[in-house]
Image (cartoon, helix red, strand yellow):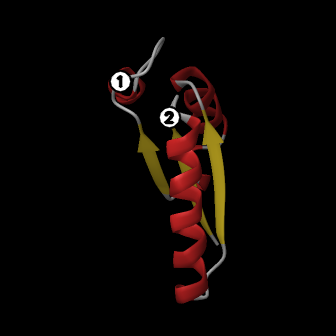
Amino acid sequence: MIKVIFCDDEVPLIQRYIKLFESIQKKIKEQICIETYTSGEQALFHISERPDTVAVLFLDIQMSGMDGIACIL
């Protein structure tokens, strides 16, 4: 299983990413677990609790509050 996290404050964009990864999942025949967050604080909390479970992380660079740059620093 591949775990993917999307962190973006624009929900329609997250929905497009989910559809894209669902189509990828069908092609590669590998289960993809998708989690979504709308704030950097939420994503950082999840990652700090279980850092070894995330394979791919997509972070929005510009968000209100903690943005993607602050999350990785």
x, y percent for residue 2 = 58, 68
Q: Secondary structure at mark 2?
A: loop
Tell me residue 32's x, y (percent). 63, 69
In the rendered image, the vertical position of residue 19 relative to residue 43, given as above or below: below
The answer to which quarter of the image holds residue 29 is bottom right
Query: Given the current orientation, which residue lies at the most extreme front position?
Result: 12
At horizontal 50% and vertical 34% (from top left) the residue drawn is 8
Q: Quadrant of residue 60?
A: top left
> Which residue is pictured at 66% across the width and 35% down the height?
49
**Residue count near mark 1 (Cα–Cα under 10 Å), binned few <14, some 14–19, many ≥20:** few
Side of 24 where 34 appears, left or right: right
Q: Report the residue at 58% width, 32% height from top.
A: 43
Q: Amino acid at mark 1?
A: Gln
In-front residue for pair 65/17: 17
- Residue 4 in the image, given as x and y percentages of width and height: 55, 56
- Quadrant housing residue 31: bottom right
Question: At x 58% / y 37%, what residue is drawn?
Answer: 11
Q: Amino acid at mark 2?
A: Asp
Give the secondary structure at mark 1. Answer: loop
**Of 6 and 2, the residue lying toward us:** 6
Q: How far across and down, in percent of the image, does residue 72 sit? A: 37, 30
Marks 2 and 1 sit apart, C-alpha to C-alpha, by 9 Å
**Is 46 above or below relative to 58?**
above
Quarter of the picture containing the C terminus is top left
Disc 2 target residue: 8
Q: According to the image, label 1 marks what residue?
A: 62
Can you say which quadrant of the picture contains the N terminus?
bottom right
Q: Earlier in the sequence, mark 2 or mark 1?
A: 2
